[in-house]
Amino acid sequence: MVYPIVLGSGKHLSKDRRIVTLRLVETETFKSGVFCFAIGLERGTKMTKTSHREIAKSFLKLAASGEVREAYSRYIGPNFRHHNAFFHGDRESLMLAMEENATKNPNKKLEIKLSLEDRDLVATYSHVQQNLGDLGSAVVHIFRFEGGRIVEMWDIGQAVPEDSPNEDGMF
């Protein structure tokens, strides 16, 4: 059985649909007829992997924009669990709650102010406003990753007060 392989630029080579340019490095044909080759990136091309930090930020932005199912489809692992005390700890419960919130608050605004990554953990600090003119909340999300997917999440929020003695503000 022969499996054709096409080398060149513009080919999708991974599940995340990144496009890379390849070059043939070495070939060898054995007596058995098996053809062996080695490929590498074309000179000057860098194959980049999306960082956990970028995935976490993309997930939050997509979910906040109302595209909750798309955010889950792209970034959440099948065995996802979370630690939000107001919902069951499973994937479906939180997704439905996020969809309900998006329906009630179609003008939600999320601005990520800070993000940190350490191996398989990412933390974000955001200003979330449910509606225009709302003072909003400061929200911290902590994500744990496995295999490039979010598999666990913690979140906590604090309402932005109208008056605060802190001259530095929350953001």
Image (cartoon, rainbow, N blue to C red):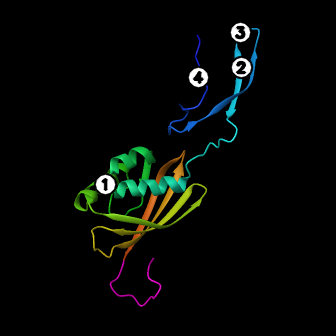
Measured in 3D between alpha carbons, the distance from the residue under mark 3 to the one under mark 1, in whole angstroms, is 55 Å
Marks 1 and 2 in Cβ contact (< 8 Å): no
**Which SS class for mark 3?**
loop
Q: Is residue 14 above or below residue 35?
A: below
Choose the circle earlier in sequence order: 4 or 1: 4
Q: Amino acid at mark 3?
A: Gly
Choose the circle earlier in sequence order: 1 or 2: 2
Q: Amino acid at mark 2?
A: Cys
**Which SS class for mark 1?**
loop
72 left or right, relative to 35: left
Q: Is residue 48 above or below residue 116?
A: above
Circle 3 sits on which residue? 33
Q: Amino acid at mark 1?
A: Gly
Rendered image: mark on residue 66:
1
**Which SS class for mark 4?**
loop
Residue 128 position, x and y percent, is 36, 68
Choose the circle earlier in sequence order: 4 or 3: 4
Main secondary structure type of the part rendered in magenta: loop
120 left or right, relative to 139: right
Rendered image: mark on residue 36:
2
Is 163 within the magenta? yes
**Which SS class for mark 2?**
strand
Choose the circle earlier in sequence order: 3 or 1: 3
Circle 4 sits on which residue? 6
Measured in 3D between alpha carbons, the distance from the residue under mark 4 to the one under mark 3, in whole angstroms, is 19 Å
Residue 28 position, x and y percent, is 76, 18
The magenta segment: 160-171
